[in-house]
Image (cartoon, grey):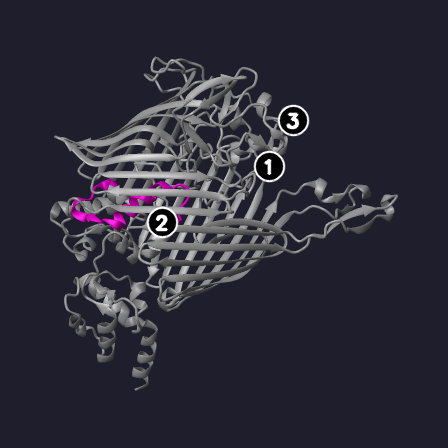
Amino acid sequence: MKKILFLILLSFSFAQTKKLALNSATLDELYELPISPKLAESVYDYVEYQGPVTNIYDLTILPLMTPESMAILKEYATTNEIKAVGSDRFQEFSRKVESFTGTEGVNEGLVEMWLDRLAEPVNINEATYDDLIALQNVSPVDAVAVLKRIDEGSITYPRALRGALGLSYYGYRNMRDFFTYEETSKGKSNHFWCNTTYKTIPSTNSFDEEVGTTTPLSNHPGDLQHKLLFMYGDHLKLGMIYHRQMGEKNRYTTIGGITTEEENQSKTLGGVTLPEMKIAISANDISFGPISFDRIIVGNFAVTMGQGVVFESTDFFAPRRSGYGWSRRVVGAFPDVSRSFEYALNGVAAQGKVGKIQAIGFFSKNSRDAIINSSDSSFSSLITLYPRTNIGFNGALTEPMLNTLEEITYGGHIRYFQNHDFILGFSAYESLYDRKLDPQIQRTIIATANEWRFLQSIGNTADTEIAAMYASTGESPLWSKAKAFRRVVGMDFTKVIQNIAFQGEVGFLDKDGDLSTLKNDPKAIVFSSYLQFNNLNFLVLYRDYDLEYDNPYQRSFSNYQRFKGTIFEDTFYLEDPIYGFLYTGASQPQAERGVYVSSRYQFHRQAVLTTDFDTWTRVADNARYYRTVVRLQYRLTFNFRLNIRQKWQQRGAYNAYDPSAFYSRESLVRAQLRLSRFDQVELIYGRSIVDFTARRRLSVDYESSGEELALVGNKNATGHALGFRVIHNFQNDSKISFSTLVYRGFVWSFEETDFRVFDSLTDALRWYIAYSSRLGKNWMLRVKWTNDMSSPITNYYYEGATSSIQQRMPWETITGIPESGDLRVQVDYTF
């Protein structure tokens, strides 16, 4: 009797909720039902391994099923699939859509594809290799397994897909929402999605504590984005985006009118003035006899080839981006409505296939921001600015940087597919510039008083990477204005053998103008092997990049971005600190040589262990690094999870004379209690210690002839954080989140869709409150306010006539308390 009363009381928390579709429910969703965890697992196993449930009474054969449990299942679950289309599917998968629409950084360009697949899932039997591999956590082994299963016969229900030989459950779980098992009707309905986001925090470029955000020059005015996607039927798509970075003025462009020259300045009379935006129009799935085009794009587009060694057009850098797991790298040409601007392509691109041959071709002409040499009007380097401005920290620059370089880039990628499991590709591109490329580092970028430090400073041992920057002077018959060029060619492959995937790419930068021989040209190599079982995967990746392989479109695997450890990091040595964006805004990987090993192992139903190990050498100065991260997720009960993350990282361990060696240890523990309706309560504790190289000038007091320790200087830096987070979901499709964190030192944290990195010398309190709500069927509103407040800082100085009567005195001039507040508002509309 007590058990029945308990189940009845528990069931009240599920009142007025939509019935759960048993045949497509996840294990976590079954746990949410007011039944025992063991019974939820039995129902899940029955559906997974014995097929879809056609009648709910089929479950009476389960040993744990009781009449009371059957009554609850009949009330809160259904054996019928809940079908939805368009915005209804957006509502059904609201949590996925919320995550996608908040995506920033390297995966941002794929959002349009994911939203399209959610709105109108395609028949799994019509899926291509690229359709499958574009999804997060779907490996080449998974993709090939599905294609081979389709060859055996049509997949007509989820169990048939799950039964594909070689398909992991992890891959199946991440692809099932994007496909259907029924024939898709032609002439599908139109879909529209628009987004407006305003925020006063830096954009999240990568979910990594070392490269998570780029600090802009100013946070006023705030970051503003308007994005629009319109899908018309089966074949036509329109995408538009206007993006103003933090601290940046609104940008406009004039169409038409008459351009005149007055006092050496161009002036446009008449015409129509519009906001400067990116526009992409694409025609999809068009056939001309044996030739079929996946996409033909006019306007802004993005292109990715192979493993990113030769070409990938994005402004953003992501460390350890292997193309597996959550961070995808999808080969092809796509409409570009991302925030990328420096490496954005504008022109025409096409992707098509004939039989087993797939080809990508593109042509782009666009302006670039660059550092101009005042001596001869050549340019030293491309630069990605946050925000885009011609005003530096020290005032107006000697030469402007915005849109000062015209670039024509064209290229292509040809791939040969053999029996699904082997792909061989060849790629090439050439960039033409209307200025000579001459890196005048000391004359243009480094301040005159600090020119001697270049290649000489003991703290900037990677300056040889700057010295290896590419230079070019030349002409082209394709463009009369061309004064410099850059050519890169390469080859890539993918081979799947049962449950192992091999991938690799090699790229060559043509420096002698002779493509017939590449023996002496700088090169970059990436090779990986991926072993997959149902509950275990194992990745080994090797990369080797020559120092002179200066390819601005390279986005392949690396731990650090280009120019780390160089004088570009020390902005106080530069002519203007704004030139420091050569490093902080860099998206090109650093020249590294090393091996990366990663694995995910679910060794128990309740426990998952993830490990990463990377050891590499920085080519510029032969500095040795290693990095190890271990993550354990343990589910003590069906709704309580414990997440432990431990990181060890070191540089210079093999060189006692390394002036910039460090040893870092970082621990993070999160205890998460999951309640009904996806409510959560989470406790967070973190601690970090970083040891630095001992420096005698900071260790001893020279006034005492080195006999006493100094009262200034640190041999290490520590950080700690303690906090909690609460998430509550209301019945009207709205949610509120609140989080508080007390910290000191260097700390990073996930804040809804934002990834934040912050540092405080004193004890600090950081909190945020976020609210999201579906305003009817088509609207979504998200608002987040963050506040950070630090304790007062007390400084000391020495006062006394002689060293023998020194006395530490408080410095009373600092009385303020550092405090900051950030706002993020996002509105989405879909139909």
The quadrant the N terminus occupies is bottom left
Q: Nearer the viewer, mark 1 or mark 3?
A: 3
Q: Residue at x 84, y 48 (%)?
A: 806
* Of callouts 1 and 2, the N-terminal one: 2
Crowd class of label 3 (few under 14; some 14 to 19; many from 20; radius 10 Å):
few
Which numbered disc flags the more N-terminal residue, 3 or 2? 2
Mark 2 lies on residue: 100
Q: Nearer the viewer, residue 33 or 517?
A: 33
Residue 384 percent coordinates (x, y) = 48, 33
Closer-to-camera residue (144/193): 193
Quarter residue 752 falls in? bottom left
Q: Is residue 214 left or right of residue 161?
A: right
Q: Which residue is mark 1?
A: 658
Residue 90 occupies quadrant: bottom left
Q: Residue furthest right?
A: 801
Asked if the residue at tag 2 contacts the one at tag 3, i.e. Cβ–Cβ closer than 8 Å, the answer is: no
Report whether 48 appears left or right of 557: left
Residue 483 shows up from this direction = yes
**Camera-nearest label, 1 or 2:** 2
Q: Position of residue 526 (x, y in %)?
A: 37, 34
Q: Residue furthest front?
A: 270
Q: Is residue 568 visible?
A: no
Residue at horizontal 33%, vertical 76%? Answer: 12
The residue closer to the viewer here, 58 or 818, is 818
The amino acid at mark 2 is: Phe
Magenta residues, start to end:
101-130
Residue 746 magenta: no
Of the numbered discs in the image, which one, if any, rests on residue 504? none
Picture disc at residue 450:
3
Q: For the residues labelled 1 and 2, say whether their Cβ atoms are less than 8 Å apart.
A: no
Query: Which label lies toward us, 3 or 2?
Result: 2
Tell me the chief SS of the magenta region.
Answer: helix
